[in-house]
Image (cartoon, rainbow, N blue to C red):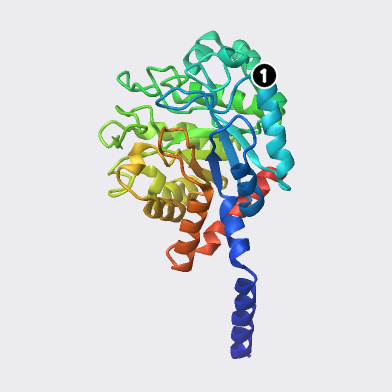
Amino acid sequence: MKKILLILFISINIYANSSFTEEKIKKLIGRTIILGFDSQTLTKSLKNDIKKYNLGGIILFDKYYKSKKKKNIKNPTQLKKLITSIKNTSNYKIFISIDQEGGWVSRLNPKNGFSKTPKASLISKRGIKFAKKSYNKLAKELKNTGINLNFAPVVDLSINPKNKVIVYQGRAYSKKPNEVVKYSELFINEMNKQGILSVIKHFPGHGSSLKDSHKGFVDITNTWKKEELIPYKKLIKSNHAKIIMTAHVFNKNLDKFFPATLSHNINTIMLKEKMGFKGIIISDDLQMEAITKHYNLKETVTKAINSGVNILLFGNHIDNKSIQLETIVNTIYNQISNKEIKLSSIIESNRLINNILKN
């Protein structure tokens, strides 16, 4: 009887795997990628990415990181038209994402016809009433354009005064974990009211760093503190953490070999297993030099997926580093074929993505 059941189990699994054609697998892979693109209108290339590969989402920028040349956003009318055309092209719900924290990181700003959103450090100084009013206004503006995913709030602690990428720019609410949690929950709640998903960042903490991962390797081994995990723990417990961005920071006490983005110890063992996070992990931009100076594309996607990352972000906004979706999808597909990446990991990521987009 046991032998018959074993044969039946093997047969079912062979049949199930045979139903995953190359085309279907590549579409499953495509759903796990958010990509930047180089236009203010729907391009033929982007349309093909949506139709052929089920591109998971796009990320919008007002300008390029280095050259500061204008990118996707001209004004509210143009942006709404662009987003509408993207949504009309897809026969599934697609992520339309942006970094709209307020202050320094505001892709939508008065220069391109949008409102000014205060930086986090100012928000926390002005208090709850001011914060709620500011974020209510922001959320409504995002909804009006068609954006449904915001890479914010920042839950890093402003504990290192020499930190230029988070603390100096006023992107952190406070050095006190409870203050960070208070304003982060308010931010997330206001986004939720308008049907916008929030991404909390940068796990396991970027507020103690001394360098910028856009420009190279960031080692936080000697500066990172365990208290930087408190906002994540509390937001997970209160069910506010649906999507978490993992950072390109290295801490040899947490992983002796890899930065958080590529670390199974950090993303799976620490965040998913020990801290009980059941949502989506998204990478920080995989074209930042903290990654590209040390790993090629094949190594990057393999290590990221195997570490527990569910969505890979390629911003295509760091000049001269644009990458095509087809290249990313084919690289991952080949690694699945070579048994370096499990197809089950891609299927699980699709399950998480589909579940969050149903709500």
Residue 163 sits in which quadrant?
top left
Measuring 51% from the left and 23% from the top, which residue is drawn there?
70
Rendered view: 59 above or below 263 = above
Quarter of the image where the N terminus is located: bottom right
Name the residue rendered at 42%, 56% in the picture. 302
Number of callouts in the render?
A: 1
**Residue 200 visible in the snapshot:** yes
Identify the residue shown where x is 29% and y is 50%.
Answer: 257
Report which residue position mark 1 lands on: 136
In the picture as drawn, the residue positioned furthest to the front comes out as: 44
Picture coordinates of residue 170, whole percent (x, y) = 43, 17
| Nearest the eye: 40 or 288 | 40
Residue 229 placed where, x, y %? 43, 35
Q: Position of residue 329 (x, y in %)?
A: 52, 54
The quadrant of the picture occupied by the C terminus is: top right
Residue 95 locus on image (x, y percent): 63, 39
Whether 68 is drawn above or below 319: the answer is above
**Image side of residue 244 versus residue 95, left or right:** left
Residue 359 in view = no
Q: Secondary structure at mark 1?
A: helix
Quick one: which residue is furthest to the left in this view? Answer: 222
Dot 1: few (<14), some (14–19), or many (≥20) neighbours within 10 Å? some
- Left or right, 237 with respect to 207, comes to right
